[in-house]
Image (tube, helix red, strand yellow):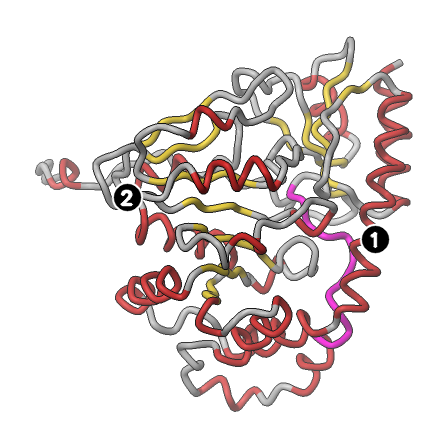
Amino acid sequence: MNTGSWENNVRKVVPYVPGEQPKFSNVIKLNTNENPYPPSPSVRKVLDEYNCADMRLYPDPDASVLVNAIAERYGVKSSQVFVGVGSDDVLSVAFLTFFNSDKPVLFPDITYSFYDVWADVYRIPYIQKPLDSDFRINPDDYKCENGGIIFPNPNAPTGCEESLEMIEDIVKSNPGSVVIIDEAYVDFGAESALSLTEKYENLLVVQTFSKSRSMAGMRIGYAIGNEKLIKYMNDVKFSINSYTMTPLTILCGAAGIKDEEYFVRTVNKITETREYSKKRLAELGFTFPDSKSNFIFASHKSVPASEIFTALKERKIYVRYWNKEKINNHLRISVGTREEMDELFGALEGILK
């Protein structure tokens, strides 16, 4: 076999590891923050009426139907909206577009674990700023020379919300770099930073259809910001792949975001179940930061998280566990239906005995 040195030129990275997707049925899946309820009936109607013959055509590269629907929903111009294949795609393009200096990008040490992966694959220097003992950001950590800033609000995997005042303080203190607020979970009770995008041209807000709109399988994400930011992102996107979204995805996304009544009703059901779950978990001896997301980041007072994780999995109940420093005694528990959560609590009662 030829043992040449071609591997010396391979871009080697440690990939992102998503939550486990079980390959069998009859499980309670509370490990990937999916919405337990189906998408809007408007999406079902699009699927039923779609003409499959249209699949022979390339999609609209501008995804105009979807972009216009998002713009209308948030009261912004279409030129202020960027769409991509899930918020991961949007964030990846944003990293490639805006984090392009020799200065380090800043983000928390406990946060969405794709950030350091993108930084590594794009050869972007970065520094992870430690959260405090309550899993909160210290804004002063982000008032230094940097090549960009990104963090989720609410944070993942902790669920903690940072105030709009704190976010504005960071954005205002960094006029020379782009600040990205990743709002994948904002609809479950946090305050969005979208109102600040008209005030600060260096602020980009990213959201997704995967959580509050029950469309993780459709892969729709979007960013809203200053028109110049969006133009730069589109320039990069069209330099990589012009046709990133299928025609069916575009139509389903537009239909889903227009059904405000269903969206509000579903989100309210999840937040009510979350608050109920907080009480049940506390009764079982768990502690957790106050969550403003569709998950709870819980630690038990006496039983290690790794043991609980394994015992739940044996009972076909999946939650998320990371064997990482500072969070290796926590479980991230997605909020399912009331019935799913009650099954979880019943299993926990048996495990904790």
Kind of residue at badge 2? Tyr
Is 316 placed left or right of 347 in the picture?
A: left
Is 121 placed left or right of 30 in the picture?
A: left
Range drawn in magenta: 32-43
Residue shown at 58%/55% (left/top)?
195
- Pinpoint residue 63: horizontal percent, then vertical percent: 47, 76
- The residue identified by callout 1 is 268
Report the front residue among 105 and 121: 105
- The residue identified by callout 2 is 122
> Splitting the image into 4 quarters, where does residue 147 fall?
top left
In this view, 107 is above or below 262: above
Kind of residue at badge 1? Asn
In this view, 177 is above or below 256: above
In this view, 338 is above or below 330: below
Residue shown at 37%/46% (left/top)?
178
Report the front residue among 143 and 278: 143
Q: CA distance from mark 1 to mark 2?
A: 39 Å
Tag 2 secondary structure = loop
In this view, 309 is above or below 121: above
| Tag count | 2
